[in-house]
Image: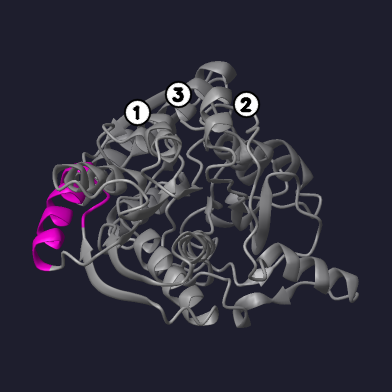
Amino acid sequence: MSAPRRVTTLAVVGLTVLAAGCSSKKSSTTSTSSTSTTPAATAAATSAAGGASTAAAASGDVPAAIKAAGGATLLTTPAPAGVEAQYGPICKGSDLGIGKIDLKADTIGWAQSEKEANPFRIASTKSQVDEGKKRGIHLLTTNAQSNVQQENSDIKGMIDKGAKAIIFSPINSTGLGDAIDYAKSKHVAMIPVDRNITGVEGCKSVGPQLGSNFVEQGKRAADAMIKATGGTAKLAILLGATGVNVTDDRTAGFLAELTAKNATGIEVIFKQTADFTREKGQTVTETLLQSHPEVNAIYAENDEMGLGALIALKDKGKNGIAKTHIVSIDGTKGAVQAIVDGNFDAVIESNPAFGPAAEDALNAYVNGDGAPAVSIATDNQYDKSNAQAGIDSGAAY
């Protein structure tokens, strides 16, 4: 998430990686655009009309978490490759009393939110660690194992060990106030990646936030489901974790797109949280198949839940898109392979490789001209036409 205004260094260097796979390698897959208007398109239209920064909050494409982070103002300077949209205001560490950081000498912390059994989390941490090694950064790492109290303690502990900045993936969008307040009191830079922090005013508690447009991901998943089912299905939704903007946005985007496309033939008959895990995706789907055996389509809000659902479907002989359609979000190798194998219809990418972008954002925030409050990555999409290429190229992580 970053932008130029002459916030150029961050925008151009930092965020081109967000369109890549789980390394800094650029994805060779084809991006499938949603038919809905994107924030980037809104920005282009505004620029063409001669407008300056415009309030994009009126657009349904701006997720609530972006607005809450102070990012409702859409920056109209051209976004670099790999960036869908950038939102103001411009955050400067000095406004919070944060001094300059020597990235070659000072300690930086990386706080992972969930156990690294999920390919997204593995790739996410790998990106941070690899980039730290590349730049010669002394990087402390922690993993909260999906416990919000632990993540608060992890962040505060790294600060007590001398970390001058914390790059972190929030376990949820509202539960890290203790750690954020502590960092602010110690003048430590805080850079959230992947999930947004809500309930804080942009730039006044945390630095620039980097992530995907989860509402748009939900919309693209709905479009893929409409295409796969021909607009008629008995649908179940496997929801992600509660209290997380990712879950709220992916659900809202999906349901809004069904309404916008008048897909009344797709009947949502089941919704249940499966906590973004394969195990719960399987158990929830087992329960689903007992109570609603008529279900013939599943929208899984991440790949792991979708792959868990696939196990349950195989046990009942209901796997394969001729029997049960599946659309999921993330872009992991297992889910993309499931497209090749004929078990998934589509996978919407959510890129985890924030290491280079986060370090560039941090550098601009504390040592440069500042960075936008929110930057949104461009995510690719897989279906039968490009799934094998995504696996062969390594873009699917």
In terms of depth relative to the viewer, which is nearer, 356 or 239?
A: 239
Q: Is residue 109 visible?
A: no
Q: Does label 1 or label 3 sit earlier along the sequence? A: 3
145 with respect to 161 (left or right): left
Q: Are marks 3 and 2 in contact (CB under 8 Å)?
A: no
* Dot placed on the residue nearer the N-terminal end, 2 or 1: 2
CB under 8 Å between callouts 1 and 3? Answer: yes
Which mark's residue is nearer the viewer, 2 or 1? 2
- Residues packed near mark 1 inside 10 Å, few (<14), some (14 to 19) or many (20 plus): some
Q: Amino acid at mark 3?
A: Val
Horizontal arrangement in the rendering, residue 312 relative to residue 10 (left or right): left
- Label 3 packing within 10 angstroms: few (<14), some (14-19), many (20+): some
Identify the residue position indicated by label 1 in the image: 141
Ranked by sequence position, the earlier of labels 3 and 2 is 2
Whether label 2 touches label 1, CB < 8 Å: no
Residue 129: image tag: 3
Dominant SS of magenta comes to helix
Name the amino acid type tagged 1: Thr
- Nearer the observer, 148 or 377: 377
Q: CA distance from mark 1 to mark 3?
A: 8 Å
- x and y percent of residue 39 in the render? 67, 66
